Amino acid sequence: MKVIVFDLDDTLYDEFEFVKSGFHAVASFLAENFNINETDSFQWMWESLQTQGRGLIFDDLLREYRLYTKKLAKRCLTIYRTHKPKLTLPEESVRCLESLKQYPLYVVTDGNKVVQHNKLQALGLYKIMKHCFVTHRYGIHHAKPSPYCFLNIAKREKVSTNEIVYIGDNPMKDFVGIKPLGFKTIRIMTGQHREKKVTTDYDADYTIQSLNELIHIINTI
């Protein structure tokens, strides 16, 4: 029996969709409380992300509008992290999960506990997956590349590690901790890490360009 485990961000959906949703929530808050044009502030944040990266976007935005205080920047970050995102699983992911429903399906995802929970809830993954592991619920030291949650799945399913297949996108942390233990690994070449070149130790056993290719690979493992 195989057990299929997915990463979340940039594997089952495009993480930038969450970022956009969070920026809209912050822009809406600033519009309601400071009469700042919602479209303009959203556009400023989005362009800043493209040019400067994540950094201190909310600090910089508030400075742009001469509103900066440490307290207000923290408030914006809290709104971003705790808002209920408007997310939908891409059709490709829906088809993929449907084609694999005969297997036990899991998610293992790193990140802020509240943020990741809200994403999983918005995407309807709690109803689809047998269990969703947010690694930070078990302590940040159990985040990937720690194999902690993966070994937990092996114990729950009573299977050996070589019967578990993991699909992720980030070669810097997704595979290096579990490959030596016998887990089968698949890298999906999407999202922010798709151009990253890494050594064999860090890369997955297999690569795919999209989830449409996954069922074929799983059938051959």
Image (cartoon, rainbow, N blue to C red):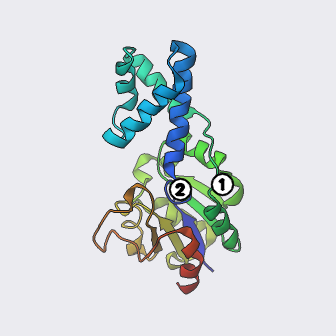
Give the labeled residue for mark 1.
125
Q: Secondary structure at mark 2?
A: loop
Give the labeled residue for mark 2.
8
Does the image show residue 154? no
Number of labels in the image equals: 2
**Amino acid type of the residue that numbered disc 1 sits on in the rendered structure:** Leu
Disc 2: CA contacts within 10 A as few (<14), some (14-19) or many (>=20): many
Left or right: where 147 falls relative to 108: left
In which quarter of the view is residue 220 placed? Answer: bottom right
Residue 82 image position (x, y, % from top left): 56, 33
In which quarter of the view is residue 64 placed? Answer: top left
Of mark 1 and mark 2, the one earlier in the sequence is: 2
Residue 13 image position (x, y, % from top left): 55, 55
Residue 149 image position (x, y, % from top left): 51, 59
Q: Secondary structure at mark 1?
A: helix
Residue 1: mark: none
**Amino acid type of the residue that numbered disc 2 sits on in the rendered structure:** Leu
Answer whether labels 1 and 2 touch (C-beta < 8 Å).
yes
Distance between the Cα atoms at labels 1 and 2? 10 Å
Disc 1: CA contacts within 10 A as few (<14), some (14-19) or many (>=20): some
